[in-house]
Image (cartoon, helix red, strand yellow):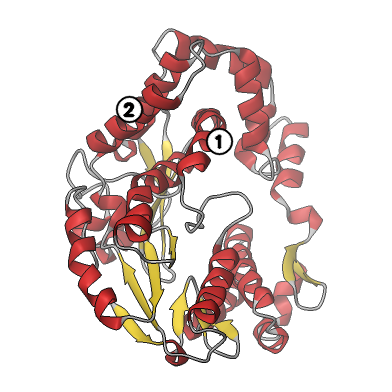
């Protein structure tokens, strides 16, 4: 059974750092009654996920993203609150995505330290091998993943008061097919740039989980946990790391690394997954290696050229913007790239990038700090405009 207190906890966790969004503001109106009604539907086993928003991101490549309704995101957080502590007990310390106190920067720093340690402070040869999975999220068998998660809950979750509810909700969100109940917020022509096996609309029923949902990241991480421990325990590597489906191995024995590839491929085949045939990289550490948007070399870490190029494209989109939604979308993209540049201490690149912004854009935005972030002026922010519409009686 799910309780109101448990949903309240999930609701507060869900709206954290999202309270200014329109969906969060609308749900906040009379949210107590909405949570009670949600609780009843879950306990009556009549809960079904609502309508999602589907859109295409174009950088660095065309990719389909689904954004769940705010109420469904509360359910995702309710699940995560209960399963994340249990997952953390079994996860390898060398996987970085969607984990507290980890992330992209943590992964890059881990790679730097692994190279430095394996090469004995750059005094002996070692090699870096980097691999990627092909169409990872779209290749996941939903039924297989639902069973894996259900078995994990049965074996490890000890609170009997809501154990069956947790099992029910996990099965519901994993097996949900958002492509049959969604609004497309991108031009239909954008889907022409996506291969058939990269879209839930054409991927085939029963396969693929929606990129953009919390549970997708959490459960996909759990699925690939078997790969992390296979590299460490079965293959005997010490210096490995993974961010989503992108992973590396650092070792002094090149032959051992090459011999591991077919073994990795065989393991993944058992889960319906494959290595990307065009994304295999192995070089001496002095050649440098690209990982999660950064390039790691012996003497420094710098932002990858592709990331810089995409940042420039984001500024160009801002310069072309004619409406506030276009401005806000471009600003969100720019700030992501500024974060990458800040971590690599590339002040000159940040300054050069933001100086490309045309003067007319400053009626909507301003620059904070030393080229650290692009901010929307207060009168144009979503929360301000939504509250104004509420006060005007337009909701």
Q: Position of residue 303 (x, y in %)?
A: 56, 81
Disc 2, SS: helix
Residue position for label 1: 85
In this view, the residue in front, 305 or 224, is 224
Q: Is residue 75 above or below residue 292?
A: above
Q: Which residue is mark 2?
A: 151
Given residues 338 and 233, the one toward you in this image is 233
On the picture, is 34 further left or further right than 380? left
Earlier along the polypeptide chain: callout 2 or callout 1? 1
> Where's residue 120, x and y in %?
53, 84
Q: Name the residue at 31% across, 40% down.
A: 179
Q: What is the quadrant of the C terminus in the image?
A: top right
Question: Is residue 2 positioned above or below 292 on the image?
Answer: above
- Residue 192: which quarter of the image? bottom left
Q: Residue at x 79, y 54 (%)?
A: 379
Q: CA distance from mark 2 to mark 1?
A: 16 Å
Query: Quick check: can you spot residue 223?
Result: yes
Q: Is residue 254 left or right of residue 113?
A: left
Q: Secondary structure at mark 1?
A: helix
- Give coordinates of residue 160: x percent, y percent: 48, 12
Label 1 crowd (10 A; few <14 / some 14-19 / many >=20): few
Mark 2 surroundings: few (<14), some (14-19) or many (≥20) residues within 10 A: few
Return the residue found at the far right: 369
**Residue 360 place in picture, x, y as percent:** 71, 77
Q: How many marks?
A: 2
Q: Is residue 350 above or below residue 10?
A: below
Residue 322 image-quadrant placement: bottom right
Labelled disc at residue 384: none
């Amino acid at each position: 059974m799910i309780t109101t207190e448990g949903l309240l906890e999930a609701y507060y966790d869900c709206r954290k750092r999202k309270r200014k969004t329109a969906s969060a503001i609308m749900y906040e109106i009379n949210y107590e009654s909405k949570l009670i009604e949600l609780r009843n539907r879950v306990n009556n086993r009549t809960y079904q996920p609502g309508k999602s928003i589907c859109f295409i991101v174009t950088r660095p490549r065309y990719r389909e993203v689904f954004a769940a309704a705010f109420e469904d995101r509360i359910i995702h957080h309710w699940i995560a609150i209960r399963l994340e502590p249990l997952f953390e007990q079994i996860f390898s310390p060398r996987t970085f995505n969607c984990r507290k106190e980890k992330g992209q920067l943590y992964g890059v720093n881990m790679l730097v330290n692994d190279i430095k340690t394996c090469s004995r402070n750059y005094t002996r040869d070692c090699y870096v091998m980097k691999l990627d999975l092909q169409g990872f999220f779209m290749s996941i068998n939903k039924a297989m993943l639902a069973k894996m998660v259900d078995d994990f809950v049965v074996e490890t979750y000890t609170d009997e008061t809501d154990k069956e509810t947790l099992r029910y909700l996990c099965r519901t969100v994993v097996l949900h097919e958002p492509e049959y109940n969604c609004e497309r917020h991108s031009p239909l022509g954008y889907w022409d740039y996506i291969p058939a096996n990269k879209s839930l609309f054409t991927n085939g029923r029963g396969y693929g989980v929606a990129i953009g949902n919390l549970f997708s990241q959490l459960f996909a991480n759990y699925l690939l946990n078997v790969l992390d421990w296979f590299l460490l325990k079965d293959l005997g590597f010490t210096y490995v790391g993974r961010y989503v489906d992108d992973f590396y191995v650092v070792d002094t024995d090149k032959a051992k690394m090459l011999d591991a590839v077919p073994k990795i491929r065989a393991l993944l085949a058992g889960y319906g997954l494959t290595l990307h045939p065009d994304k295999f990289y192995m070089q001496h550490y002095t050649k440098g290696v690209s990982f999660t948007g950064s390039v790691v070399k012996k003497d420094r870490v710098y932002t990858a050229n592709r990331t810089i190029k995409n940042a420039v494209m984001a500024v160009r989109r801002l310069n072309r913007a004619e409406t506030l939604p276009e401005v806000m979308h471009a600003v969100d993209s720019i700030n992501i790239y500024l974060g990458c540049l800040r971590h690599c201490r590339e002040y000159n690149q940040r300054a050069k990038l933001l100086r490309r912004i045309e003067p007319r854009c400053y009626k909507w935005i301003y620059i904070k700090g030393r080229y650290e972030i692009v901010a929307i002026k207060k009168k144009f922010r979503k929360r301000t405009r939504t509250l104004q519409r509420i006060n005007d009686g337009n909701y």
